[in-house]
Image (cartoon, helix red, strand yellow):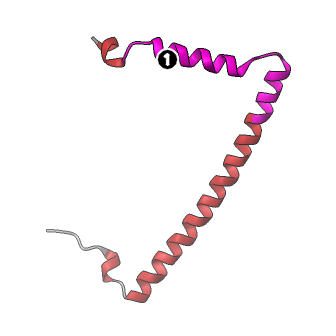
């Protein structure tokens, strides 16, 4: 026996209200996520700045990591 979708049992006005409310909630969630992302980005920039002042070359390290990834074997070969 198939279950009925409760949204289909609502009137058109109720469905519109449900979807509008959902969109409003999701928009607030997205706004909060962007705020958190901004904080994380600020913290990362602070750490990058401090590492540069300590003489750490992050660009060089990133290039070395890229080379290591290219030289590594595919996961399928490692599993054999």
| Residue 49, above or below 29 | above
Q: Position of residue 71 (x, y in %)?
A: 46, 11
| Residue 43, above or below 10 | above
Residue at position x 83%, y 25% in the image: 50
Query: Which residues lie in the magenta part?
Result: 45-74
Q: Is residue 4 left or right of residue 68?
A: left
- Residue hosting label 1: 69
Q: Nearer the viewer, residue 23 or 70?
A: 70
Q: Residue furthest left?
A: 1
- Specify whether residue 63 is painted magenta: yes
Which quadrant of the figure contains the N terminus? bottom left
Residue at position x 60%, y 59% in the image: 30
Q: Position of residue 40 (x, y in %)?
A: 70, 41
| Residue 47, above or below 8 | above
Q: Main secondary structure of the magenta part?
A: helix
Within 10 Å of disc 1 (Cα), the crowding (few <14, some 14-19, many 20+) is: few
Q: Position of residue 42 (x, y in %)?
A: 76, 41
Which quadrant of the figure contains the C terminus? top left
Residue at position x 31%, y 82% in the image: 9
Q: Nearer the viewer, residue 7 or 75?
A: 75
Q: Nearer the viewer, residue 51 or 29?
A: 51
């Amino acid at each position: 026996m198939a279950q009925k979708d409760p949204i289909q049992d609502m009137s058109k006005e109720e469905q519109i209200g449900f979807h509008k409310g959902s969109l409003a909630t999701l928009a607030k969630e997205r706004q909060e996520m962007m705020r958190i992302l901004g904080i994380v980005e600020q913290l990362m920039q602070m750490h990058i700045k401090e590492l540069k002042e300590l003489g750490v070359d992050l660009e060089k390290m990133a290039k070395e990591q890229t080379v290591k990834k290219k030289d590594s074997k595919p996961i399928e070969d490692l599993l054999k």
